[in-house]
Image: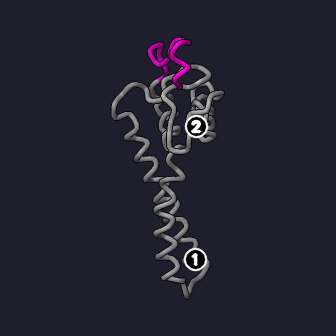
């Protein structure tokens, strides 16, 4: 149940740990810490979000593949190849941007499932103001 709770919070772009604070300050900017509980959202590693990049690529490619197969299936035997070419290009540009904040929060949720938070993941009240 803890894993489902973490993932549900992440998909709402909330702090996966507490669910109260927003994990993003703007669409493409993830906060350093949760404003509600002080949880460090990058977990202190320089290359922490490499897994989020992988999640983002998988999500974008899945959206593209499902859309491509759906259009071919719905329009067979005369698929609109030119429309699919340009529409597919637009989807492959837009999908990573749309999925970006979700990939970061979902990655954080997966990390919390396998590596529960420790005391070093939280900030004292004085540091919460910069989140």
Indicate the position of residue 45 as horizontal and vertical percent values. 36, 28
Furthest residue toward front = 130
Indicate the position of residue 63 as horizontal and vertical percent values. 52, 60
Question: Image height check: is 125 above or below 85?
Answer: above
Residue at horizontal 60 percent and vertical 41 percent from the top:
11
CB atoms of marks 1 and 2 within 8 Å: no
Residue 15 image label: none
Identify the element where label 1 is drawn.
helix
Residue at horizontal 45 percent and vertical 53 percent from the top:
58
Question: Image height check: is 75 above or below 43?
Answer: below
Residue 73 image label: 1
Residue at horizontal 52 percent and vertical 39 percent from the top:
106
Query: In the image, which is nearer the foreground, mark 1 or mark 2?
Result: 2
Indicate the position of residue 124 as horizontal and vertical percent values. 52, 11
Residue toward you, 100 or 5: 100
- The alpha-carbon separation of the residues under discs 1 and 2 comes to 33 Å
Residue toward you, 28 or 53: 28
Which residue is the site of mark 2? 10
Label 1 crowd bin: few (<14), some (14–19), many (20+), radius 10 Å: few
Residue toward you, 107 or 125: 125
- Range covered by the magenta-colored residues: 116-131
């Amino acid at each position: 149940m803890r894993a489902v709770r973490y993932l549900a919070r992440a998909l709402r772009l909330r702090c996966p740990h507490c669910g109260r604070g927003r994990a993003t300050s703007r669409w493409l900017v993830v906060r350093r810490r949760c404003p509600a509980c002080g949880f460090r959202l990058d977990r202190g590693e320089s290359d922490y979000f490499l897994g989020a990049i992988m999640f983002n690529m998988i999500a974008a490619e899945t959206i593209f593949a499902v859309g491509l197969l759906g259009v071919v299936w719905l329009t067979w035997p005369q698929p609109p190849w030119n429309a699919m070419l340009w529409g597919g290009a637009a989807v492959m540009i837009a999908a990573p941007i749309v999925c970006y904040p979700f990939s970061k929060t979902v990655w954080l949720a997966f990390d919390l499932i396998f590596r529960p938070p420790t005391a070093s993941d939280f900030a004292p009240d004085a540091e919460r103001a910069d989140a």
